[in-house]
Amino acid sequence: MTLPGARSGGRMLRPSLFLLALSSLALTFLLHSVAAGTSASLPARPLVLQMRIDGEIEPILAAFIDSGLEEAAQRHAALVLITMDTPGGLSDSMRDIIQHILASPVPVAVYIAPTGARGASAGFYILLSADVAAMAPGTHTGAASPILAIGGFPVQLDETMRRKIMNDATAFLRSYTDKRGRNPQLAETAVTDAKAFTEKEALDGHMIDLVANSTGDLLMRLDGRAITRFDGSSVELHLTDALLSSYELSGRQRFLSRIVEPDVFFVLLILGALGLYTEFTHPGLVAPGVIGGICAILALFAMHLLPINFAGLLLILLGIALFILEAKFASHGVLLAGGIVSMLLGAIFLVRSPLTPAGVSLSIALAATLPFAVITVFLMRLVLRSRKWKPATGAEELVGLTGVVTTPVAGSAGAPYEGMVRVHSELWRGVSETPLAAGQRVRVTRVEGLTLYVEPAQSVRGAGS
């Protein structure tokens, strides 16, 4: 039985709960709107994406810079800051970096730092391609003449080839330096005369935009600065309270950047060839084959990225062939010397770079070639010598040995003569084409199962006399 008052109280309670829930939702929405309005009213901090070029410029580093510029565009960065300290590098990688800098939707500043750093050779081209070119005190740049080097030593070219390479380099430099508002005539002297510049000389010559003591000083001086992009548009940089975010090489890129260094590539190529050669000449060792296979595959990967001169590869293969021939023929060291010279020339011709001396260094070429030559000749001689060794176990080792007849080897005419012979203190069934007397010395000619085919030992001596 339900009381009337209780029923009416329940009907009054339901609207109250509904109003309470509605009020909670309205309060939540109001608080969210206030928070969103507050966050929207706060200005977002400008993002500066920082990358670093440290060491030789090579394909993995070029890919790293390219991906960093894409990352900056996706994150709507206000500026990309590339801090640089490089002796130069491969021309193909340099050109790839410059093309992406010129096409970047985000302004790019290249800053040679810290004190004592340099932006030489390929680094000079990259510096002048940036929207903002800056240097720290005590740094230098330039020395960007095209160089064809062998083992780090420059090679003299004929006048036509020299002019061709020089004109190509200066035209490439002029193609973007003038549009950046820099001094193309002075910049060309770094190519034609191999001239280098300190930060003050570069600033006075209108090749860079400013000299900054640090990264913070650089960003502060760029804040509010209007720059002209490569496409002619003007952009004002707003870098107040900028958020500096580093973009680093991944572990994979660090590993690959080591592989594509010319010296490391050459060592991997030699280790791969030596390991596989050892496994083929001495089957069953396993470890040399595994190590050699891994090194060979890594070398093939580097070969895909580096500008390889196939004449260098052919010279290396010729050197290996000459080492093998040295083990087979008595050339009194002529083939060995020829192989060493061929492999050295192959090493220093292996990586071609017309704008920088990047390639296999002469010290690494010598350090890898000489041990490789000695080990290859030694292993091949072991293989050739082993083919002449008599079997030391099994029935085959009995062939050629001498023994003594213990039971006369006799039989009927027209059939093999059979008896017993003692060889190595063991009794064997002996078969001969002629009868043999007990105590007569015999020589084993072949073995079939437990039967020895023998002949009189004196007949062999007679044949040799």
Image (cartoon, helix red, strand yellow):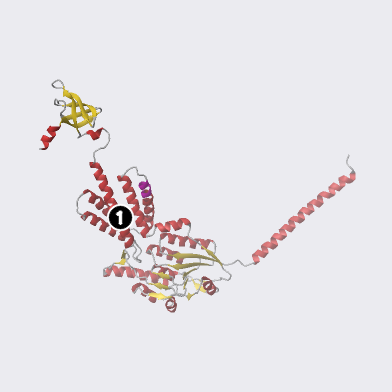
Does the magenta run of residues contain 31?
no
Q: Residue at x 38, y 62 (%)?
A: 92
Q: Magenta: predominant secondary structure element? A: helix
Instruction: List x then y, in percent, for residue 98.
Output: 43, 66
Q: Quadrant of residue 152?
A: bottom left
SS at circle 1: helix
Q: Amino acid at mark 1?
A: Pro
Q: Mark 1: give few (<14), some (14-19) or many (20+) Cα within 10 Å.
A: few
Task: Note whether 236 is above or below 412 in the view shown.
Answer: below
Q: Nearer the viewer, residue 299 or 6?
A: 299
Q: Residue 310: in sight, yes or no?
A: no
Using the rendered image of the protein, determine whether residue 141 is visible from the camera's viewpoint: yes
- How many numbered marks are there? 1
Residue 173: horizontal and vertical position, in percent?
39, 70
- Residue 258 lies, in percent from the top left, at 41, 58
Instruction: Please give the residue where the numbered disc 1 appears in the rendered image.
Output: 371
In the rendered structure, which segment of residues is drawn in magenta? 287-292
Q: Quadrant of the C terminus?
A: top left
